[in-house]
């Protein structure tokens, strides 16, 4: 392939030759000879007729929680039996990433059948998806008239939110699946919680005999337990945090961590979990099981950005919940409750039989305001949020999450009063 320099020389030679012939000026036409000699030397002493280069790059690790250095390994091999003396390697690195070791663009020489490994190292950036590459290798002749280019597609580095180790809230949806779990099913079956007592039947596990009750009734009495099952859960992250600009970043990141932590915990408990990302950027991960599914959820949350939704949140939540969840399943909404219309959507879900838990990260009151009007606007926003909280508390479970308090502490207070059923 010709370089731009070669194209310019070729065009210049063509113009000189045509002018020399038209004007019958042989001295002008003879100026083509030096350019032709340059092309001749480039063909004889430049790149070989066939250039074979193997090129690859690898991001290690491709998935990160932002707590480790990222390595980019570039592997190249000259499979030509000739030395390539003018080689340029360029790895496209996003501006947000600052290299600590290595350079994204280098010039080098590759000897015949030589293999080279290059390492680039940088600290893990903040949460998000980053395109590393494409990786381009260009080999030119000494006169830079001919060019061989090899290109490798970009790799995606995903910096995902790390789920926190938390204890879950006591979910009590009406819909339960057939698989064993930790949610009481209000029926007899394998479990940990006491459900009732009955007379001993031959074949019962001796460990379940209630010896105190047996002594009282003078016959063997067996404890029965409440069955524990799993459920279907949809975690909804509302990305609208337009409360007060200095506090928006912290408020939003807290919501992302909560969504990641809850999804991870619920999946480990055996539940089928899905996630809805609702805001300026939208995304959906349909409910499913397993470790690989957890990675899909964290991959979606890595791309989350704060912003006001174009489509109303109450409409999106109600529509997707009915499409993706069975009736009477569990919905967890993580929202700063800026949009008061969310109340109507939740009221419709509760009326349809869904169990709804609202987790609302609370903004920290600013130490000072730039102006009096700014303070008045903030107070009005907080008053509207308080009204929304009061309206929601009448129809579903609501937990406010102040800054500085662990999420486990907040979720531990989300409980139902259990009634002991005895026979």
Image (tube, rainbow, N blue to C red):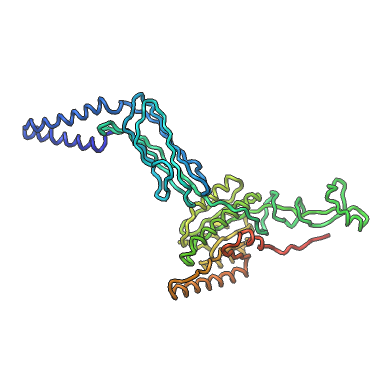
Q: Name the quarter where the C terminus is drawn.
A: bottom right
Tell me: residue 160, above or below residue 141.
Answer: below
- Front residue of this view, candidates 400 and 204: 400
Q: Residue at x 44, y 76 (%)?
A: 372
Q: Residue at x 47, y 75 (%)?
A: 376
Q: Residue furthest left?
A: 24
Tell me: residue 105, above or below residue 208.
Answer: above
Q: As drawn, is 420 to the left or to the right of 32? A: right
- Is residue 173 among what the camera can see? no
- When asked about the image quadrant of residue 325, the answer is bottom right
Tell me: residue 420, above or below residue 201.
Answer: below
Q: Name the quarter where the N terminus is drawn.
A: top left
Q: Residue furthest front?
A: 101
- When asked about the image quadrant of residue 57, the answer is top left
Q: Residue at x 53, y 48 (%)?
A: 67
What is the x, y in percent for residue 335? Answer: 54, 62
Q: As drawn, is 116 to the left or to the right of 23? A: right
Q: How many marks?
A: 0
What is the x, y in percent for residue 253? Answer: 52, 58
Q: Residue at x 37, y 25 (%)?
A: 112
What is the x, y in percent for residue 34? Answer: 16, 30
Q: As drawn, is 131 to the left or to the right of 145? A: right
What is the x, y in percent for residue 103? Answer: 39, 41
Tell me: residue 94, above or below residue 305.
Answer: above
- When asked about the image quadrant of residue 118, the answer is top left
């Amino acid at each position: 392939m010709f370089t731009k320099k070669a194209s310019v020389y070729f065009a210049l030679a063509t113009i000189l030759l045509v002018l020399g012939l038209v004007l019958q000026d042989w001295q002008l036409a003879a100026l083509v000879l030096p350019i032709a000699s340059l092309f001749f030397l480039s063909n004889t002493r430049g790149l070989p007729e066939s250039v074979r280069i193997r090129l690859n790059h690898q991001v290690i690790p491709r998935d990160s929680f932002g707590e480790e250095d990222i390595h980019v390994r570039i592997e190249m091999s000259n499979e030509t039996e000739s030395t390539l003396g003018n080689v340029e390697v360029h790895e496209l690195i996003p501006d947000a990433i600052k290299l600590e070791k290595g350079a994204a663009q280098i010039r080098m020489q590759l000897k015949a059948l030589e293999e080279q490994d290059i390492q680039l190292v940088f600290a893990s950036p903040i949460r998000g998806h980053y395109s590393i590459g494409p990786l381009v290798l260009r080999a030119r002749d000494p006169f830079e008239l001919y060019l061989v280019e090899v290109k490798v597609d970009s790799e995606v580095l995903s910096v995902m939110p790390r789920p926190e180790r938390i204890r879950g809230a006591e979910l009590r949806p009406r819909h339960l699946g057939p698989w064993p779990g930790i949610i009481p099913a209000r029926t007899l079956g394998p479990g940990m919680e006491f459900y009732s007592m009955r007379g001993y039947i031959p074949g019962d596990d001796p460990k379940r005999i209630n010896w105190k009750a047996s002594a009282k009734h003078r016959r063997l009495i067996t404890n029965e337990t409440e069955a524990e099952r799993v459920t279907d859960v949809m975690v909804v992250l509302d990305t609208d945090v337009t409360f007060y600009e200095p506090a928006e970043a912290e408020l939003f990141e807290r919501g992302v961590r909560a969504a990641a932590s809850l999804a991870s915990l619920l999946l480990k408990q055996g539940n089928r979990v899905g996630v809805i990302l609702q805001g300026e950027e939208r995304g959906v991960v349909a409910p499913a099981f397993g470790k690989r599914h957890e990675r899909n959820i964290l991959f979606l949350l890595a791309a989350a950005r704060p912003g006001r939704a174009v489509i109303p949140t109450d409409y999106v939540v109600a529509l997707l919940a009915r499409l993706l969840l069975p009736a009477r399943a569990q919905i967890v909404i993580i929202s700063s409750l800026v949009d008061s219309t969310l109340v109507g959507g939740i009221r419709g879900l509760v009326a349809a039989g869904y169990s709804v838990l609202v987790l609302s990260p609370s903004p920290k009151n600013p130490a000072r305001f730039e102006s009096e009007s700014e303070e008045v606007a903030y107070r009005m926003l907080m008053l509207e949020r308080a009204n929304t909280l009061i309206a929601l508390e009448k129809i579903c479970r609501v937990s406010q999450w102040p800054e500085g308090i662990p999420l486990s502490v907040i979720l531990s207070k989300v409980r139902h009063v259990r009634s002991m059923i005895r026979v």
